[in-house]
Each structure stands twice: as C-alpha cells, then as structure tokens.
Amino acid sequence: MLDAVVVGAGPNGLTAAVELARRGFSVALFEAKDTVGGGARTAELTLPGFHHDPCSAAHPLGVNSPAFKAMPLHRYGLEWLHADLPMAHPFLDGSAAVLSRSVGETAASFGPRDAGAYRRLVEPFLPRWDTLVRDFMSLPLSALPRDPVTLARFGLVGLPPSTWLMRRFKDEKAKALFAGLVAHVIAPLGGLATGAVGLVFALAAHAAGWPVAKGGSQAISDALAAYLKDLGGTVHTDYEVKRLDDLPPARAYVFDTSPTALARIAGFGGHYDAYRYGASVFKLDYALDGPVPWTAEEARVAGTVQVGASRAEIGAALDAASRQGRAPDRPFLITVQPSLVDPGRAPEGKHVFWAYGHVPNGWTGDLTDAVERQLERFAPGFRDRVLARATAGPPELAAHNANYVGGDIACGAASGLQLLLRPKLSLRPYDTPHPAVFICSSATPPGPGVHGMSGHNAAKAVWRRLRQEP
C-alpha cells in the first residue's frame, strides 16, 4: 500500500507530492492530461517555433515561494529570467508608472505627490519580506507565525479594501497601477483584503522581481516532476480519475482539483455547494512579427504590462465581469512579453505575446476585437505585427484545465471572505469529510498563483496525519 496518492499534476499537486516524498513517504501522482503542469504549461499554440504559455506566464509568486526556494529546482532546469522592469503601466499620454526592483524608481514614476506615500507603504515590510511571505502564505494554522508583529501590521494595512488603501495616493498613476495589481486575482476593488493583494504583488516585485521561466512555464512543472521522480515518486499521465476506486490503495489521497470535482469523485454530495466560482478571462496568445509597439518606452522593456487608462476604467471592467454579468467594453488587460528576455521562445526577430481581459464566468462570446482595440490605444500599430493568434474563452479554458470551472482560473472567487477562508470556513481547510482525503488546489489557502504553497501546506496536514497512525 502506498502512503499517499496525489490526483492532479498542477503546481500544487506536484509540490504536495514532492513534500511527502522528501519526508520518506511513498507517493504516486495521477494526471488526466498527457503532460504534467495544470496552469503552468507551454505549447505551440499559433505557429511552429512560437512557444506560448496557455495560462500563467509571469511568476512573482513563484520566484518568491518558500516552497520552491526550499527545493533544488535549478538542478532540474528551472531558470528565472528577469526583464529590465518587472512591470509597467502605460497611460494614454505616452507616460508610464512602473513596478521596479527599486522602491525609489517605482515611487519616482508616480510623481512627487505620491512618491513619499508609496515609500511609507512598502518600506516597513521589505526588510522582513522573507519571513512575512512565509507567514502570509502558510496561513491558516499550517505553521505558527515567525514574526507575528509584522504579520499583524501587514493585516492592518491589507485587510481593508484596496479602495481605502488607495486614498493614500493623490494622482492617477499610483492609483491605476495599484488597482491593476488587485485585478490580478479578478476581484472587485472594494472587496475585503484586496489591499493585501496589491501590496503582496508590489512587495514581491521589489524583493525578487516578476520573472518568466526560461523556455516557458512548463519548465516549473517539469522541474517539480523530475525532482519527484528522483525522490522515488511515480507520475502517471493520461489517467483520468472518476471515483476513488480508480486509484490504488493508499493511506492518504490528496486532490489538486476543484472542490466540485473532489465532491463528485469522493462522493461528498453537497459538501462544497456553497463554494463560489468567480469571473473568467478571455485569453489571447500572439505570434508577432516584432515587439509590441508601445508608446511608453517603459512598457517596451517590461516583462508584464498592465493596460488600463485609469483606476475608474479598471474598476468598471472588473465590475462588469464580476457583478454585472457582461463583458467590459474596455477590458483591463494583463499582458506578458516573455520573448523580450527569452528569445528562444520565438523564431529570430519574432515574439510571443500573452494577454487577457476579464469576462463573466461561462461567457461564450469573443473578446478579441475589444482586446485589440484596447491594445491599439497604448500600442498603435499592434495589429500590423500580428502573424497569428490563438484565443481561449471560458469554455476553452475549462476544457484545458478542469480546475477552471466556468473558466475561473483562480479555482474559486477570490472575493469576500472566500479570498481568505477557502474552500470552507474551517481551521483545517485541507481536510475533507473523509479522514484520509485532502484537498490541495488553489481552492485552499493561500489561493491562486503558481507558488505551490497550497500543496506545501496540505502536505503538512497529510504527514501529520500519517505520523499519528500506528
């Protein structure tokens, strides 16, 4: 009998399997697709030689992940590549705010009226970032806080809505950039703890940047899988699990799946019926004949570019997708330019480009024209550079990854109390109604992102249970 079986080979499932194998447990991992990866994959989606990331592309949480830092993933081919700027936020007048490794450079890009306010916001936390991120991403109760005072101070700043935090700023540049940071979790700007979301992304950039993985996001998943195999774990792909009886006998079962899928497979009935899925995205992967012709010079050297003219425009786009059930007329876009720092991702002189805007859960329309009209506002002539495009709305995203219910790439709405308490109100969020079954997906704390910490935290719950058994 195996000690543990893990279902789902996304970053969290892979991390959970590695953490268990590192501690001497026998582990087998089962994945329905023909490759490991989940939300961290790479594929030729447009033309031969253009290597795109179907979901995640830039990894501020991955490079800062305490779980990944504790593993020798560099030995298995994982290399982080950093653009000159982690992120830029251009404006219609050709200027831009930036998120730089330097707090000073970032603050200066906001203008003199907000530079001091930004410094006062982030500088108290940066010297303690390594401890803070471990405490923040290990909650709840998977580990005692190492610096409870700093964590409490962070909570006082971050738990209120981001709209409160943005009152510190006077001008549009700082407000728009911060609103864009919050939008990465597809949450309305006025939601609980959205200030913490924006602050975490900003601190992550200052601490370690917003890199891409050399060769594509698949490199993260492949490194985890290779490490797992060296630890004695086994990986089985093309293996769809429809019920627990499909799996070999084990002392524990760990699911990197949506709560909906887990309830169906394990026979939990309506245990997760109150769990909410959030808005989706409409994603485009481009093969380009050259770099994106951004008007703002800063955007031309940034790994990630946020596209939204103002805080009000960003907020309206989020509200349309999350609350009003319609696609926004001017979508807020998150875009990534991997081939700026990884030219091997495209043929010589060509580029890959990644962009998405928010749409309602399950939406079946086509946002391509709206996305490209928005891009043309900030990069005139963009359409002239397009050689090919691949589009994916909510149905295609859900088909690509079963965890994206209705196209929700966060595996559950990251708004309200569910941002902090997921998948249920519980001090043991990785436990389920069955004592031998656990959940480790992004539906558990600390939530969405390629960081493996949900898998890391769940693995702790598993090995504590296994060690209690006779």
Image: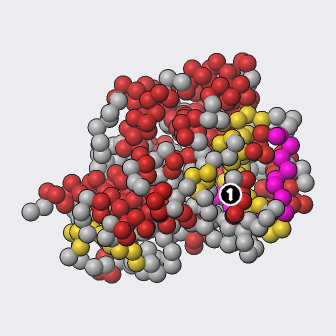
Compare residues 292 and 231 and report the one nearer the observer.
231
Residue in the picture at 90% in, 54% down: 381
Q: Residues within 10 Å of mark 1 (few under 14, many from 20)?
A: some
Residue 329 locus on image (x, y percent): 78, 51
Question: Which residue range is magenta in the image?
Answer: 280-297
Name the image quarter holding the N terminus: bottom left
Q: State the residue lying farthest toward the left.
A: 470
Residue 332 locus on image (x, y percent): 72, 47
- Label 1, on which residue? 342
Residue in the picture at 21% in, 54% down: 464
Residue 260 magenta: no
Residue 147 locus on image (x, y percent): 35, 30
Compare residues 324 and 118 and report the one nearer the observer.
118
User: For numbered disc 1, what is the local secondary structure?
Assistant: loop
Residue in the picture at 43% in, 36% down: 130
20 relative position to 416: left or right: left
Compare residues 273 and 350 and report the one nearer the observer.
350
Q: As shown in the figure, which amino acid type bears the numbered disc 1?
A: Asp
Residue 349 locus on image (x, y percent): 82, 62
Give the quadrant of residue 327.
Answer: bottom right
Q: Is residue 16 above or below residue 5?
A: above
108 relative position to 323: left or right: right
Residue 286 magenta: yes
134 relative position to 38: left or right: left
Q: Is residue 390 above or below residue 186?
A: below
